[in-house]
Image (cartoon, rainbow, N blue to C red):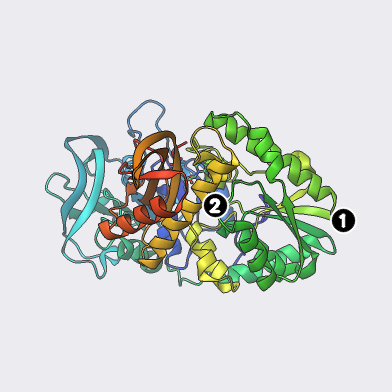
Amino acid sequence: MSQTTPTTTADEELILVLDFGGQTAQLIARRVREQHVFCQLVRHNLPASRIRELNPKGLILSGSPASVYGAGSPHPDPAIFDLDIPILGICYGMQVSCEHLGSQVSPGESREFGRTPCQVQQTSELFDGVAKDFAVWMSHGDQVQDLSDHFYSLAATETCPFAAVKHHTRQLFGLQFHPEVTHTEFGGKLLSNFVKNVCGCRGTWQISSFIEREVALIRERVGQNRVICGLSGGVDSSVVAALLYRAIGSQLSCIFVDNGMLRNGESDGVRERFSRHFKTDLHVVDARELFLNELKGVADPQQKRKIIGKVFIDVFRHEAKSIPDAKFLAQGTLYPDVIESGGAADGPAAAIKYHHNVGGLPSELGFELIEPLRDLFKDEVREMGGQLGLPDELIWRHPFPGPGLAVRCLGEVFEDRLRKLREADAIVIDELRKAGLYRTVQQAFAVLLPVQTVGVMGDDRTYQDVIAVRAVTTDDFMTADWFHMPYDVMERISTRITNSVRGVNRVVYDVSSKPPSTIEWE
Ligand code: XMP
């Protein structure tokens, strides 16, 4: 809920991931939570004394782009190895653990990258239920070359004799491969074995108990005051509103700003869903004209984002002032945002953000912040939404950027261009839904290009706009593949757009992945 609130209660099982900067550190935490065990990322060098206070059942040391022998490479507090808490080192995490206890790490003869056959050599609680031969995902140049007598090997690949190791007397395991990646067969089983067999967790963490605890915390903190929640129409803010509504009912006021950059029917949809699920105060601010005026003549994408962000804050501030007794502002900040912004008390330092969120509200608005989702991953937020009674259709909505259609209307933004984009976008989504593909892709939309092309209509030549269709599959929106959309669906989308959207005579499909492209066009 806030940075100072303890995230687990004393009797809750906790696993900590020490983050050495590897790309999959967050994924480790997600996979552990799938075992119903609460898991958080902390700095790689969190002092052993603090770890002792947090009282985790186990530690997982993540991978890293660094070499353990490189200058300035990240190392844990050596005292963690004497805490008598089970440890699993993954990739770099294994190397750093083995090195600390007398093994030699150096560059392997060849780098191992990708799916690799692996053979289990020794039975152990970590490999319970894992096949003797299975495929693992490797991504390393260094490896443990000279294993100290403290350890023995559990598994090997052709070029890596110590693909998995165990300490003779301590509950310390190492995996050179990445169990958190889905390409590793039995990866989930390995992590479950560590968490349950080795650390003794029972797997009691559940969204339902998380909801109960947050509701109690919110009630206690808010007292008789009023809370404002900004609604965007998306999943996160809707779940925040639903949680707050459960906690404080009519002490909740919601603000929804119609900035004119919304999809077809969005404003009515928000009103309609709101009245179905909440019997409390809703402020819909129609600021379409204001936004459009400010955007007049602006074609530069970053400039558009800036203007929309600034006007949004002004409009929101003005509306919030009309709610006199409000003391708190609720926001749908998620755990990945907290980690990436370096905002967690014991968490890793800030990492480079890949995109620029617009719609965040500055602290000078003068409210105390309530962020009840700051410990949750997106899939957990969806689960929470379901348990709070929100409909599937809302829970599984594709993400929509804060600056809205402005960054999909390439070039200058004005009403007739937005109309074309809205109509085309509605067709794309409608056809994907009809084909049962809406949830197969994680994001899909139309883009209005800033070029005109020649076409024919009857006997006449036309010179009109082009719509690009974008559909991607992705796990985390950091990387994405373009969706291999069935031709018949493409055909229906194209035909409907060119037949019914006035001013558009051509449709193209975007076949670029991220990287090197981004998901949005601007
Ligand atoms: P890109 O285009 O960076 O998008 O590959 C990754 C994800 O971020 C969303 N996105 C934004 N969201 N404000 C937002 O709130 C923005 O300015 C913004 N730009 C991109 C995008 O829709 C995708 O889900």
Dot label at residue 415: none
Residue 305 in the image: x percent, y percent?
A: 58, 35
Residue 285 in the image: x percent, y percent?
A: 74, 51
Tag 2 and tag 1, C-beta contact below 8 Å: no
Q: Is residue 319 left or right of residue 31?
A: right
Task: Please name which of the two marks, 2 or 1, marks the residue nearer to the observer.
Answer: 1
* Crowdedness near tag 1: few (<14), some (14–19) or many (≥20) residues, C-alpha within 10 Å: some
Q: Residue at x 57, y 67 (%)?
A: 385
Snapshot quadrant of residue 117: bottom left
Q: Residue at x 24, y 51 (%)?
A: 137
Residue 33 in the image: x percent, y percent?
A: 46, 62
Snapshot quadrant of residue 405: top right
Label 2 residue SS: helix
- Work out whether residue 214 can be spotted: no
Q: Is residue 4 left or right of residue 101?
A: right
Residue that extends furthest to the top in the rendered view of this protein: 71
> How far apart are the alpha carbons under marks 2 and 1?
29 Å
Residue 212 in the image: x percent, y percent?
A: 64, 71
- Does residue 515 sit above or below 470 in this rendering? above
- Does residue 61 sit above or below 453 in this rendering? below
Closer to the camera in the image, 389 or 501: 501
Dot label at residue 325: 1
Quadrant containing the N terminus is: bottom right
Closer to the camera in the image, 49 or 379: 379
Amino acid identity at mark 2: Tyr
